[in-house]
Each structure stands twice: as C-alpha cells, then as structure tokens.
Image (cartoon, rainbow, N blue to C red):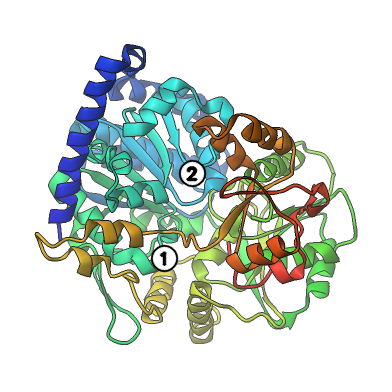
Amino acid sequence: MEIHHVVRMLFSCLVDADYLDTEQFMDETSSRMRESYSSIVDLKERLDRYIGRFSSSAPSVVNRLRSEVQRMCEERSAMTPGVFELTVPTGGGKTVASVVWAVNHACRHGKQRIIIAIPFTSIIMQTAQVLREIFGSENVIEHHSVMSDEMINERTRLAAENWDAPIVVTTNVQLFESMFSNRPSKCRKLHSLANSVVILDEAQSLPRSFMQPVADAISTYTRVFGTSFLLCTATQPLISGCHKGCGPVEYRGIDAGDIRCITDRSMDLHERLRRVDMRFDMCELTSDEIARRIEGHRRVLCIVNTRGIASEIYGRLRESDDNFHLSRMMCPLHIRQCLSEIRRLLDDGGDRCVRVVATQLVEAGVDLDFPVVYRQMAGLDSLLQAAGRCNREGLLENGVTHVFRMQGYMPRGTIKESIYAMEELLRMHPDADWFDPDVIKEYYALLYKRTPTFDSQEICRLSETPGEVRYEEIARRFRLIDDEGMTLVVNYADAGSLISRLKRVGPSRALMRELGQFTVSVTRRQFEEMRRAGMLDEPLSGIYYVEDPMLYDCKSGLKAGNEYLEQTFVI
C-alpha cells in the first residue's frame, strides 16, 4: 500500500528540483525571492510572546482552562513523532493549543515546517489571520481557492508552489488530493510534507467515503517520511482500530497503539467546559413555527441542514435589519462581510438584536457567541459543533441549544446516515450526557455501522499492486468534494468590473483568483435551467456570469427560485 506514495514522493523531489533549477537559470528575480524564512526556534519565541500577552491579564474560567490545555500541549510535544489526537470541547482554544504543540514538537524533533489543513474555506482565513498575528505575515503562506487579493504577492505565490515556508495554511482538498495526484504541479509540494508537522483541524469532517485511503496515507507518511500528524477536533472520530461498516464493509484504521492522546481523560474537559444545555424537541416544526421561535429571542443563531431550508426560514422572518442569512448561496466575499458585521454587533456591548439563520458553514471553527442556538436534527458531531456557538466564552451561567426536527424534511446522502445514527443513540440513551467522550465514541460506532463504504472510489484497490498502480485513474477519482456542480460568478460588489476586465484582457491567475471571491456553486440541473431561462452570460468559454443584479440579493445571495434550493444540495 506504500509504494505509490513513495513513487509520488520521488516524483515530487525531481519535479521541484527541475523547476527550481530552471527558475534560477531563466528568472533570477523570482529565484532570489525564495529567501530564507524565520527558523522554527524563532517562531517558538514569537509564539511564547503571544501566549504571554494573554496569560498576564485576569483570566476567565474558560481562559484558565485554555491555558491549561496549552501547557499540556507543550509538555506532550516531547513525545516521539507519530500520530496524535487533540480532543478539546468547542471553545477550548484548540487552534492555538494545536499550534503550541506543533511548534514545540517541531523544535524538539527537528521538523522543518508546520502545515495546517482545514476543511472549510469559511474559517481558513480566520485561522490564517491568527497565525499571522503570532508569527508575522512573512512566515505564513495561505494556499487555497479563496485567498483575498491583498494577501497575494510574488513571494507568497512562489512559496505556495512547493510549500517552502515554515507555516502553511491550506485545505484538506489541497493536502489530500495532492497526495493522490499524478500532476507535476500538485505533486511538487509533497516532499515538503516529509519531516514536517501536519495539523488536521476539524478531523471529524474527513469524508467517511475516503477514510480508508486517507488513513493509509497518514500511516505511510508517518512511518516512511517522518511526518507527525495531529488530529484536532471537539468530537474525535474513530480513526484507529478496525470498525464494521454496513454489510461486509470494514474500515481498517490506523493501529490503535500508534495514536497518542495529548489531553488526558482525567482533565475532565467536557465537564469543566460545559456552558450549554442541549434540549431535544420531539415534535416536528414548520418553517413558520421555527421563525416565530427565532423572533422570540433578541440574539439567536439557527443552523439548518440545507440552503433551501435556510432560505425558507429566513424568508418567514419579519423583514428587519436585525436578521442575517448565511449560506453558500452567497459568494465568499459576501459571507466574510456578513460574518464580520455579525461579530461586530455581538461584540459591541449594545442591545442590538442579532438573529442569524445559517447552514453548517458557521458550525466548525467560526467564532460566534450566541446565548441561544437552534439546530436542526443532524449527527451528534454537528449538534456539538452548533452548541459550540452557544455561550462560547462562558459569559452566561448556561446557554441553551434547542434541537428540532423539520416537518416534511427527508434527509439524503451522507447526512441521512448521521441523522439515523443520532436518532438511534437518542432512543437508546434519551438522558445521555451528549458532551461525554464515551457517548461520542458510541455515536461514531453506530454511524460506521450504517456507512456503506470507506473507499467509495476504490483507491486502495487501484494502488495495491506494485508495478500496476493506476496513477491517472486514482488522481481522477480522488476528489474529496463532489465537483459535479457548476460554478457561477454573481453580480456582487465589483464583480462586474472584473468581468469587464476578463472580456478586455483575457484570463490570468490573479484575475481568476479575484473572481473566485464572487462565485456560487449550483447543481448541473440548476445550471441548465438557469441557462435555458437566459440568466447566464458567458464572457469567456467555461466562465458563466449571472449579470442581472436583481438575481443576487444583498442579504441572502443568489436568487434562483425555490426549484434551485432543493434539499439534496447540502453544504
């Protein structure tokens, strides 16, 4: 199972050496920009200063616990390189704690860089900003599809090609699809993973349908290439051991003895960080009933499973500037601006009402703090992530997260398996402590029993025979995100001027990245219906623009009618 990763690693070394030698000969200016960065030891000094600034102030109960977790991470960074788990309840400061562990581990074991892989673009820039504050912008490279234009310069572009920087912030898609790619541009960075530290943030978000090849890759990079992995989450999935799936399917995870925990169960973090009561409503509610409940609170967050449901409930609220909508019907720039405004209103200490209806994009890692949260029934991991947006800073004695069922909702796809597993757990243990790690483990055991495959694209089969590895086929099949949909550029902010420039001068890397700030994905059926209705312009072959400004709402994003907001399109 390891040979195809070894071949790609050798290919990576060859490709990068060839690119760098050619660049040195043909483009000395770019070559000189690949200057040295701060050492890991220097970065540790910066991190210690950053931590010290906060420890000197009068801490809250939550901040004292965060400091305790950070100290544990520093102590346990001395452990022999390998695979580690950091399980901390939401609000426990996982991001900074994981970096504390990673930097100290890198210093003690001579690791060359730290790579943080994040599943959601909605939080990647938030995390990168924190890292820039700690280590300086010159030492932090972002590599993802929605980088803001002001963060791109020639030096960062060059470093993103081969991840030649001490701190790299990227996505799960970039990381794992590169591990299974056959293209020089993607494989070029793989040798930078060797003798490095990789943090997998929100590890519970790894797709179950790819868990087997992902687990095999983690094991190989650890044993063969000296990479240390830290799986960081509030609800640690069952990565280790062998687990029974649906029918004859099995998940052969990482050997249980090879995964070490950073935090001890004796720390009792789930109890000490308890700030929320989770209450289940056994009745099915209509969108009107949910809207009325939301309007009964001055500050409230409602999270639902689909864009269609979010749009429907938001539309039932009485029109007010106090209401906010967040979903992937909005382009990335619009989402960031909306989140920034919500945070400003929550933090200003005023009495302004803030009512938000959102999809799961706000669930993991987004720093929002509401006294009350409503969450549509989902898997336990999602329910706990939603609860993490409730009384996040512990300023109230207790927040409340209400779990409701939506009338007429029929779950589909992977979310169906999660909901059914949660419903079964609820029937078995109606009075369970949902924050207890043992209950979370039981949930994942039930979920895995319902999982039809842990390798939906048969990646393991295609790579199991040395000399017959089908690299091109593996690269084509390994897609963490289903890309069957179509991407549209919407008419928001200055997207129109970028489209005009595209028509005038043609595409460029920088221009296409800028346009990425104004994109929304739809299904192919939605795309075809919009095209037939004359909603789309095609300024360049393969680039589709929703030119009519009336089709993009400044509050809720792309308007394409209820037929385009079907339940199957879950974000």
User: Hey, which residue is sitting farthest right in the picture?
Assistant: 319
446 vs 241, left or right, is right
- Identified at 42% across, 38% down, the residue is 169
Q: Quadrant of the N terminus?
A: bottom left
Relative height, residue 487 to residue 316 (above, below): above
Relative height, residue 143 to residue 283 (above, below): above
Amino acid at dot 1? Pro
> Local crowd at mark 1 within 10 Å, few (<14), some, or many (≥20)?
many
For the question of whether residue 497 can be seen, the reply is: yes
Amino acid at dot 2? Gly
Q: Toward which corner of the image does residue 327 lie, by quadrant?
A: bottom right
Q: Toward which corner of the image does residue 494 lie, by quadrant?
A: top right
- Identified at 34% across, 42% down, the residue is 72
155 vs 533, left or right, is left
User: Hey, which residue is sitting farthest left in the picture?
Assistant: 467
Q: Quadrant of the C terminus?
A: bottom right
Image location (x, y in percent) of residue 495: 70, 38
Relative height, residue 536 to residue 255 (above, below): above
- Identified at 22% across, 43% down, the residue is 227
Residue assigned mark 2: 93
